Image (cartoon, coloured by chain):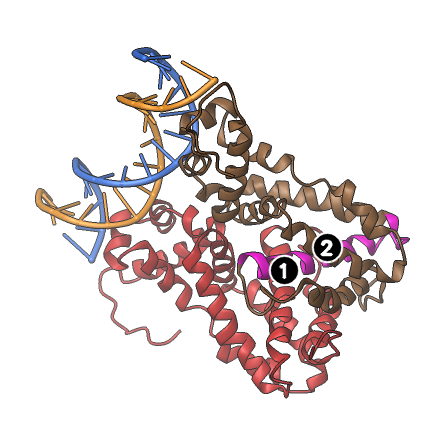
Chain colours: A red, B brown, C orange, D blue
Amino acid sequence: MAGRTGRRAGKPDTRESILAAARTVFAERGFDGASIRAIAAGAGVDPALVHHYFGTKDQLFLAAMNSPVDPRELLPQVLDGDPGEVGTRLVRTFLGIWDSPAGSAAVALLRSGLTNEWTARLLREFLTTQVIRRVLQHLDLDPVEAPLRGSLVASQMIGLAMMRYVIRLEPVASVPAETLVGTVGPTVQRYLTGDLPAGPA
Amino acid sequence: MAGRTGRRAGKPDTRESILAAARTVFAERGFDGASIRAIAAGAGVDPALVHHYFGTKDQLFLAAMNSPVDPRELLPQVLDGDPGEVGTRLVRTFLGIWDSPAGSAAVALLRSGLTNEWTARLLREFLTTQVIRRVLQHLDLDPVEAPLRGSLVASQMIGLAMMRYVIRLEPVASVPAETLVGTVGPTVQRYLTGDLPAGPA
DNA sequence: GTCTATACCGAGATAGAC
DNA sequence: GTCTATCTCGGTATAGAC
């Protein structure tokens, strides 16, 4: 998001368009299914260029995933306000990401996290260290049941994303976002702050 | 289980062992990631044999998925009993599938449903026509909000499966099944029969 | 019936010409 | 800096020898 270096040599935006095409193709086909050739074609450049700018396919994937979404910018709007409504705000913000341009990176991460072991690890660590942990830290929770609460929240959110953006199961796939905020928000709230039957045991 | 082929008498159960290996490999790597070679190696046979018994890779996948799980056998134990506890029983039965031998087929379907379009379609149709529809039919629900209820249930269940069996996010990945029954059961129950804020509108 | 050998394709990656 | 040509590898699938 930061500094365009202001240099405009001959064609400086090929690098950017490769990144954009990479995000699209990775999102559509997952990491393994995406080919450098398809990405190059999407960007309108030669496949060798892709290797020239970013080294291996792994590095390209990381470059495509790194830029677009930074949880630290979004979390305040989730955490500020009534703690009793944090579930609702979390779902709303979450859905907002997927409907934004950054959403394709999210789909890519999710799609790729299933065939490939190291992308799964990437997704897992992103969830735990970047998102769940920060939310839990902000609320005052019993530290023994906090991890379970966190992963329950993650399971509901990821399931929602899967159904709405990957599997595309109707009607969840096309219902207005606010409908989902209203229906699954309370679920998330209960996972975070409600009673968990098998909590401390 | 992997029979040493010291004996090559007539025609042993090579066909069955190919199917078993196929389920395992498909579950580990997804449809695209699984190779006929790997499956053949897992079964201890020649790759050409796989083609000989089942034609193409698509047909092999279908054959591997077809046999193992039949929702019609399991649904009665979900639907019979107190309607107020159907969510709990649904989660319990659902988790039971994944922990059984048939679970590898389920993981395979889920993993494959993300890279590949026709396997996604397979998964979607399995969910809608085989599972969700039957559960909804059994309960008496407003027909306009029933589909939304169904896909909300599916999103929570699939998310749970993703976290526990694919992404393996702790602690959901290793917590006892009954803990999850107790915690997400009420969520499913609410999606099925509870108030949905944005229901009829 | 079983497996060896291979055809054929498309992937990622590299060397070097313009 | 950009692209052409090519190397190598691993995939599915098939033909045909034992």
Q: Are marks 1 and 2 in contact (CB under 8 Å)?
A: no
Residue at x 73%, y 59% (from the top left corner): B152
Determine whether, in the image, residue A87 is placed left or right of residue B191.
left
Q: Position of residue A179 (x, y in %)?
A: 74, 65
Q: Nearer the viewer, residue A102 or B168?
A: B168
In what quadrant of the picture does the N terminus of chain A appear? bottom left
Q: Which of the numbered marks, if any, corresponds to residue B102?
A: none
Residue B160's image quarter?
bottom right
In what quadrant of the picture does the C terminus of chain A appear? bottom right
Q: Main secondary structure of the magenta part?
A: helix
For disc 2, the neighbor class at 10 Å (few under 14, some 14 to 19, many from 20) is many
Tag 2: amino acid: Ser
- Mark 2 belongs to chain: B
Q: Nearer the viewer, residue B11 or B124?
A: B11
- Mark 1 belongs to chain: B
Determine whether, in the image, residue B83 is placed left or right of residue A4.
right
Q: Position of residue A67 (x, y in %)?
A: 40, 69
- In space, the residues marked 1 and 2 are separated at their CA atoms by 12 Å
Secondary structure at badge 1 equals: helix
Residue at x 59%, y 86% (from the top left corner): A138
Secondary structure at badge 2 equals: helix
Q: Is any atom of residue A178 visible in this view?
A: no
Q: Is residue A138 above or below residue A147?
A: below
Question: Which of the two marks, 1 or 2, is nearer to us in this view?
Answer: 1
**B160 inside magenta stretch:** yes
Q: Which residues are magenta?
A: B138-166
Q: Nearer the viewer, residue B125 or A5?
A: B125
Q: Residue under circle 1?
A: B159
Q: How many marks?
A: 2
Q: Which of the numbered marks, if any, corresponds to residue B151?
A: 2
Ranked by sequence position, the earlier of labels 1 and 2 is 2
Q: Is any atom of residue A29 visible in this view?
A: yes
